[in-house]
Amino acid sequence: MPLPPLPDSAVTVGAHASDWRDAVELAGEALTRSGATEQGYGARMIQVIEEFGAYIVIAPGLALAHARPGPDVHHDGLSVVTLDEPVVFGHPHNDPVSVVIGLAVSTPEGHVRSVAELANVFNDPEAIPALAAAADVAEVQRILTLTEDAAR
């Protein structure tokens, strides 16, 4: 199953975040801009981290921010935020984070499928550094498309 779409409006390159909350909020804003979620989904993603900790930092330099399906999710969506300076989430091994992926899904099954597909994409050890260094939106989209295709 392919990843949810990644429109231009869902990508932010070289953003500044003062801390992990800002970084996650940026990913939420990108999901809202793309039409996948309503305003406030970013706050729900932050609540998940406050409740369960930094488990969303799934690889060195990479956080996968998400929340449960809810009425504020219009359709499955993905966002990518690259940071000008990495931020610390509190993960014992994978901090600091320079790439935040935002994930919104409309069903629990969609969540499991999307997380599995993202895990396949990020099995490529070059994917995270390439995303972190991407100069523009098109490059982010190209990197995700190439690594997704290679993972199949």
Image (cartoon, rainbow, N blue to C red):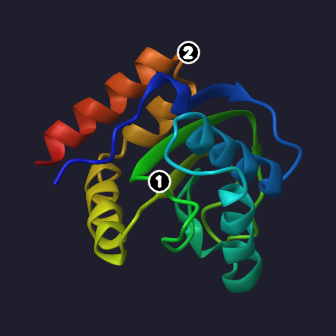
User: In the drawing, does residue 93 fall left or right of residue 145?
Assistant: right
Task: Tell me the crowding category of disc 1: few under 14, some 14 to 19, or many 20 or more residues within 10 angstroms, Cα based.
Answer: some
Residue depicted at 70% across the width and 73% down the height: 49
The quadrant the N terminus occupies is: bottom left
Kindly state the secondary structure of the residue where label 2 is placed. Answer: loop
Q: Position of residue 148 (x, y in %)?
A: 23, 42
Q: Position of residue 142 (x, y in %)?
A: 33, 23
Q: CA distance from mark 2 to mark 1?
A: 29 Å
Label located before the other in sequence (2 or 1): 1
Q: Which residue is mark 1?
A: 74
Q: Position of residue 122 (x, y in %)?
A: 35, 51
Residue depicted at 16% across the width and 38% down the height: 149
User: In the drawing, does residue 84 fall left or right of residue 146?
Assistant: right
Residue depicted at 30% across the width and 46% down the height: 124
User: In the drawing, does residue 26 fall left or right of residue 11?
Assistant: right
Residue depicted at 49% across the width and 46% down the height: 36
Q: Which residue is mark 2?
A: 135
Asked which quadrant contains residue 45, the reply is: bottom right
Contact check, label 2 and label 1, Cβ < 8 Å? no
Q: Nearer the viewer, residue 134 or 34?
A: 34
The amino acid on which the numbered mark 2 sits, given as a three-letter code, is Ala
